[in-house]
Image: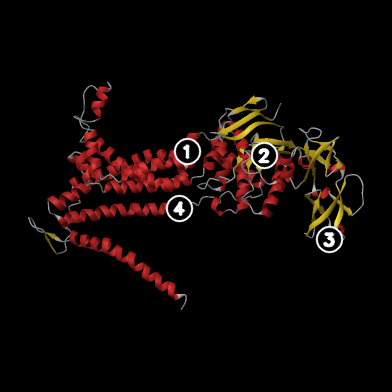
Amino acid sequence: MSGLVLEKIDKHFGSVVALSDVRLEIAHGQFVCLLGPSGCGKTTLLRIIAGLEAPSAGRVLLDAEEITEQAVHKRGFGMVFQSLALFPHLTVGENIAYGLKVRGLAKPEQDARVAELLELVRLPGLAARHIAQLSGGQRQRIAIARALALKPKLFLLDEPLSALDAKLREEMQIELRLLQQQLGITTIVVTHDQREAMTMADLVVVMGDNRVQQVGAPLDIYRRPVNRFVADFIGTSNLIPGRLREGGVEVAGARLAVAEVGPGLAEGGEASLCIRPEEVRLLAAGEAGANRLPGRISFVRDLGATVEISLDCAGTQVLCLTMPEQHGQFRQGGTVTVELPAAACLALAP
Amino acid sequence: MIRSAPRGRDHVLAVYPLAMLAVFFLVPFGIMLAVSVFHRVQGGFYEPGFELASYARFFTPFFGGVLGFSLALAGIASLLCVALGFPFTYFLTRMPRRRQVPFLVFLLSVLSLSEVIIGFSWSILLSRTAGLSNLFVALGLLEAPAAWTPGFGALLAGLCYLALPYAVLVLYPALSRLDPELVEAARSLGASPLRTFFTVVVPVLRPAIVAALVMVFVFTLGAYLLPQLLGQPQHWTLSVLITDQAIYQSNLPFAAAMAIFLLAVSLPLVGLTQWLGRRRSPAP
């Protein structure tokens, strides 16, 4: 297939396993986020794609051509590093032109391309500045411009926005996404921030425990996590322990219908009912019906824009996210009926 | 009042280093400066006076030759030490910290050896009777054992052995702070490892490299024992000459003048390092 293909990638450092059996297909023009907690192997995977690490086993293919053993400098990928790694002894213009110079471009062409790139990252006229004179956000853009100078086949970014403050980070996420759409370049970003991944990505690769947990569009992953890890890592999930019964989950004697049963579950075996807090609905006590359980309100956290209500329900804590105008009747210590709509429920392996 | 108290203490604190500087540097240097313009009494010692006779002796071909040789020797030694020490330190700093420790301990233990021991060890190592050449003969690499000492090569080897740990210690902090991502960034931009080394690693570390060069240069410029142990008389440096004049010829004014001249050559070099250090652009 055209695009980037990773086949059964394994990587270990001595006896420490960093990646195990990673398979991934990335089509051209996609914006992909490798998302996972620290130490999950996402940076190692990016470095393997870049050629900065060799996999212990497996193959890396680009447009059906194997590049597993190809040296970094022959791959022609652009990379933005976590520290940005701007050359402190060179000016902004010289930093951006570094790759062009290596490629042997004539000086006037270099200058023209540098001006073009500075325009692209919206920092025109900064070519003569020194790196030390730039702000954090400016450095970020220069690092992006430098990586894009050679019109790379792949654009790789390792936690590129982690050094920026929260507000600037959100702005840069949008900017990076727009830039990628404008250029149509295949982009892979490593991040541990799910908001960042949701903002930017066409395709999210959730990594945990040194393997790929789930691959999919951001909303698909949010709505249909395939296991507890993903449900827990992406957003907040209620995970209510029970048993699988006739395609539903039995919790405290009541069978709750679910929209989907995840992989690896057997009838009668332990299962978790997974539902997002914003899908949980509260009704007055005693209103019986399908997929409803009695509950008691243990805490109300009114955040203004939203209200988080913690419930004791079937022996577990259930979180309900609701709007301020709807919670007036629900007070701490009150009893309620908790509805878990079947369409929003998933049965996952415990 | 409250604010003036710590300031007053600062003055008190400054007294100690100032006193140390005066006792161990300013006073001896003043005496040396004075002696250098005193009148030498032939066959005796010296008497107070003011004449530039000692300084006038610099303008002789012999003196120029010795000075030129001393500077060239120190220059070659510093280039060699940095050329050897830089890759060593570079690879050392790329190792995990735990594995660096034995190397650093070994390096520091070399510093504890006295110049005399190093000099005699090298002269044995390079001698015809008991030296390395016998080993090479045994291995079939040489026809007959050779005497490699005294000679220029032996002198250079000894000086480099003596100064290499200093070069490494000067380079070490800067190299261990070098961001490995700088190298990777250059590689991802298409630069080969060699090109990366010369266009990124060396320029970024230029201040440390210059500091190491000057450090070894000044250090070897002052060496006076090794040239006598490992070199022939034509390999004697200015420092040997100073020792010779001061101790064997009893010409203290001339020795003092030469010492001051040596200092005058070394000081601008130290200044040069400072200037290059200030020009260092801060890391991102």
Q: Amino acid at mark 3?
A: Arg
Tag shown at residue B279: 4
Q: Is residue B101 left or right of residue A222?
A: left
Q: Mark 3 to mark 2: distance in Å?
A: 38 Å
Q: Residue at coordinates 40% horizontally, 71% vertically from top-left?
A: B9
Examine the rendering and report whether any part of residue A33 can be seen: yes
- Place of residue B5 in the rendered image (x, y in percent of width and height, measured from the top left): 43, 75
Q: Are marks 3 and 4 on the same chain?
A: no
A2 relative position to B208: left or right: right
From the viewer's side, name the closer residue of B67 and B19: B19
Disc 1 marks a residue whose amino acid type is: Phe
Find disc 1 in the rendering and name its residue: B197
Looking at the rendered structure, whether the residues under marks 3 and 2 are on a common chain is answered as: yes
Report crowding for label 3: few under 14, some 14 to 19, many 20 or more residues within 10 A (C-alpha): some
Q: Which mark is residue A208?
A: 2
Q: Does mark 4 fall on the same chain as mark 1?
A: yes
Quick check: marks 3 and 4 in contact, CB under 8 Å?
Answer: no
* Badge 2 vs badge 4, beta-carbon distance below 8 Å: no
| Residue A301 appears left or right of A10 | right
Question: Does A332 appear above or below B144?
Answer: below
Task: Check the residue under mark 2 and report the chain it is in.
Answer: A
Disc 1 versus disc 4: distance between alpha carbons?
21 Å
